[in-house]
Amino acid sequence: MNERLRSALVQRGITIEELAELCSVDPKTVDRWLSGRVPHRRHRFVAAKQLQVDEVYLWPSDRQRPVHLEALRSEIIEVYPNRASVPRDTWISLLLGSMKQIDVLVFSGTFFAQTNPHIARMLQERAQAGVKVRLCFGDPHGEAVAVRGREEGIGDTLSAKIRASLTYYRSLVGAPSCEVRLHDTTLYNSLFRYDDQVLVNPHIWGQPASANPLLQLKRMAGTDWFDRYAESFDAVWNTARPWAPDRQEHHRRGQD
């Protein structure tokens, strides 16, 4: 049902028969428009002009048209009340099942290594099998991390957590198909991508990421949630700097 067209008719006080006459079509044709059929271009132009609204408002293009709810539901594999409720087996099975790409975007991601002390070795093994591994952590000396620490009320603790987390991944620096970078951007979501699945952990102001909900999405034809999150990872990745621990992590303020 084209509710926008029906609403415009009511607001302008134009009947179906009157619009049909103005567009030189049968009233049954206008009924079909109201039922969802898209008119020919010349009829769209005339109807929009008579109703004094934008043509695109009445008949959005395919890109602008709302995605069917069932398609969105099929893209959502699972919803968790918080990140801590995701089973450990889910993280490991996704990692081991990846064949092309693993992307991680976090501030500290401490849990990622603490729940799996063999994470670096497993990532390196996936890379040796042809998987491209990209890990992106918050820059412990960046403004974004400082702001997030203040918002959570933990001060410099977040920066310290990042430095602790990075120690798990030293063996990946310089390893083929593995790269670790540091970003200094506002992080609205933590992202964990495994091929065509992504776990999205939204950030709620003032709360640690572990306490926030998590969506598990799968790339599906006709929807774009997965692609939008994948694009956002690439955008942050392209602004991040490579992590070179031996050269860069001795900050000018002294030892951490």
Image: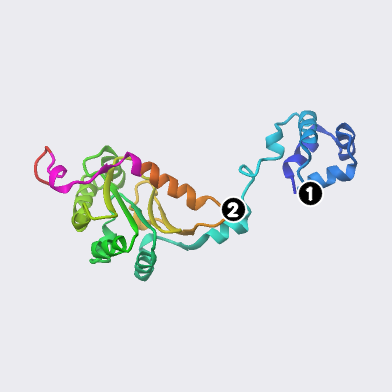
The residue drawn where x is 48% and y is 58% is 217
In depth, the one of 219 and 22 nearer the eye is 219
**Picture quarter containing residue 127?**
bottom left
**In the displayed structure, does residue 49 sit left or right of residue 204?**
right
Dot 2 surroundings within 10 Å: few (below 14), some, or many (20 or more)? few
* Identity, as a three-letter code, of the amino acid under mark 1: Ser
**Residue range highlighted in magenta:** 237-251
Residue 244 counted in the magenta span: yes
- Tell me residue 74's x, y (percent): 56, 61
The residue drawn where x is 72% and y is 41% is 4
Disc 1 on helix, strand or loop?
A: loop
Residue 103 counted in the magenta span: no
Proximity of marks 1 and 2: CB atoms separated by less than 8 Å:
no
**Residue farthest left in this picture:** 254
The numbered mark at residue 35 is: 1
Residue picked out by circle 2: 222
